[in-house]
Image (cartoon, grey):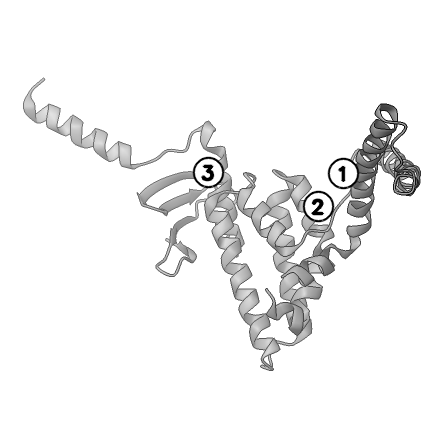
Amino acid sequence: MEPMRSRILGSTAPLAFSALILAGGGCVTHRAVAPHAESPPVPAPPVEPPKPSPAPIAAVSAVPAARTTKATRLPQQTPVPVALDLPTLEQRLRDTRAIGVFTKLTLKNEVDDLLARFRAFHRGQRPPTLAELRQSYELLLIKVVTVLQSGDAELATAISTSREAIWNVLSDPKKFAQI
Amino acid sequence: MPPTTRLLALTAATALASFRVIAAEDQSFVKDLTATIVLQGLRCDKVVSAQRNGDSDYNATCADGNRYHVYVDRNGRVIAQKL
C-alpha cells in the first residue's frame, strides 16, 4: 500500500516536502539560535554551522513558492487541487455530508462493480477491454463529481484532479493487486 | 368522544405517522432519494414525498408522477424499482 500511495502522491510530494522543510527549517533555526545565545563558550561549532545553512536555503526556496501560490489563488479564488490517494479518497467520501447514505451506498455498489470488472480484466478475461473500462470509469467519476459538486466542491475538485492517478492504479495489474 | 371514534382517530393517527411527508427540513433526504433514483438510470425530477416501509426501505413519489420502491437488498445493494 505504501508504494502505491507514494506513487499516487508523487505529484504532491514536492509541495509536501517543501512544507516539511520549511517547518523543519524553522525548528532547526530556533534550536540553533538558542544554544548560541545561552552558552557561547560551549565548543560545538563543528556541529552547528551545517545546521543553519540548510534552513535559510529552505526558507528562501519555500517562501517565494508560498507567495506564488497565494498570488495565483487570489485572482481565481479557488483552492489548488491536490491529487488524492485511494484510502484518503475513500475516507473523504465516507465523511462528506454532501451526499446521503443511499447515494453513498449506490456509488459504493457501482465502485465495487467496476473493481470486479477490472479484476476480471487483469485475470485476462475479454471483454471488458481497457477502452470499455475507461469509459465506465469516466462515467462513474462524472456521477461522483456531479453528486458532490453542489455540496462539497472541494472534494469534487480533488476527485477530478485525481482522475489520472486513480486510473493509473486501476489499469496497472501490479498496482491494482495492492489495493 | 365515544370509544369507537377515539379508536378510529388513533388508527388514523398511526397510519398518518407511518406516511412520511417530506418537509422543508428534509431537503437532504429528498436529494438523497432523488440522486439514488437518478443514479440507477431512472427518471425522477425531484422526490416530493416518501413513505417509509421499514429500515432503508421507502416508496418515493417524484414530481413528475413516477413512483419508486427504493430499498437496500440482502446483498447491500441499493435497488430502485418502478411502482
Whether residues under marks 2 and 3 lie with C-beta atoms below 8 angstroms apart, the answer is no
Disc 1 on helix, strand or loop? loop
**Vertical order, A165 against A57 (above or below):** below
Residue A10 or residue A2, whichever sits in front: A2
What whole-number distance in Å separates the C-alpha atoms at marks 3 and 1?
29 Å
What whole-number distance in Å separates the C-alpha atoms at marks 2 and 3?
24 Å
User: Residue at horizontal 20%, vertical 31%?
Assistant: B12
Residue A154 or residue A6, whichever sits in front: A6
User: Residue at horizontal 62%, vertical 51%?
Assistant: A89
Q: Are marks 2 and 3 on the same chain?
A: no
Left or right: A35, with B76 as reference point: right
Q: Which residue is mark 1?
A: A79
Disc 3 on helix, strand or loop? helix
Q: Which residue is mark 3?
A: B29
Quadrant hosting residue A26: top right
Amino acid type, callout 1: Pro
Disc 2 on helix, strand or loop? helix
Q: Which tag, 2 or 1, sits closer to the chain's start?
A: 1
Q: Which residue is mark 2?
A: A157
Image quarter where the C terminus of chain A lies is bottom right
Left or right: A149, with A111 as reference point: right
Q: For the residue carrying disc 3, how many other residues have a C-alpha within 10 Å: few (<14), some (14-19), or many (20+)?
A: some
